[in-house]
Image (spheres, rainbow, N blue to C red):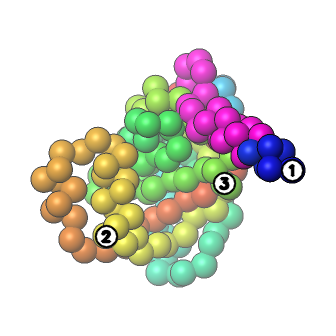
Amino acid sequence: MKYKAMLCLLLMMAGLAAVAQPPKGKATLNTTYGAGTTAAGAVDAAKLPSLLKNDTGKVAVKVKAQVLDVCPKKGCWMQLKINDSTTAFVKMKDYAFFVPLDIKGKTIVLDGEAFQHITSVEELQHYAKDARKPQEVIDAITTPKREIRYTASGIRVVE
């Protein structure tokens, strides 16, 4: 019985290690990740602030946006351009899929939910560490941040 439990644990750890990697290949035109999506019906990311207003609820919306940054460790989060002064932070639904690191700079369409979120100092510092920011930048994060968040169920590279 003890060996079965150990074997089960080892298999689970191996499975997690295999999952926690960016997908192989390049983020080329029409490549999809997660549940996939089409470009039809997507709204420009610049409309997200007005769609969300100051509401705390989630809004199901298909968005077209440029990727400004991606988690360099495994492609598990992205930063999207909303306008010249605003970005949105994207996580993949249920941590079920990641994106290639070369998706940075590409324009994508995302299916999912957008919402307002207050991100804690600890979480902001965690993402700054993931992004390999210098320690002085990480240490300068001392206040929570209200931001647009997006949970993506499907992503398509469109430009």
**Quick check: 94 above or below 142?**
above
Is residue 19 located in the magenta-colored stretch of the structure? Answer: yes
> Which numbered disc, 3 or 1, marks the residue that appears first in the sequence?
1
Image coords of residue 5 (percent x, y): 79, 49
Question: In this view of the protein, can residue 38 be seen by the observer?
Answer: no
How many dots with numbers?
3
Q: CA distance from mark 2 to mark 1?
A: 44 Å
Which residue lies at the image location 37% right of the left edge and 53% below the top edge?
127
Q: Is residue 54 left or right of residue 39?
A: left
Residue closer to the observer: 106 or 39: 106
Circles 3 and 2 in contact, beta carbons < 8 Å: no
**Quick check: 17 above or below 134?**
above
Q: Using the image, tell me which numbered label, if any, was put on residue 121.
A: 2
Q: Which residue is mark 3?
A: 93
Q: CA distance from mark 3 to mark 2?
A: 23 Å
Q: Using the image, tell me which numbered label, if any, was put on residue 141.
A: none
Q: Is residue 7 left or right of residue 70?
A: right
State which mark lies toward you, 3 or 1.
Answer: 1
Image coords of residue 77 (percent x, y): 49, 47
Image coords of residue 118 (percent x, y): 41, 75
Amino acid carrying label 3: it is Lys
Q: Which residue is mark 1?
A: 1
Report crowding for label 1: few under 14, some 14 to 19, many 20 or more residues within 10 A (C-alpha).
few
Amino acid carrying label 1: it is Met
Disc 1 on helix, strand or loop? loop
Q: Which residues are magenta?
A: 7-29
Which residue lies at the image location 66% right of the left edge and 54% below the top edge?
93
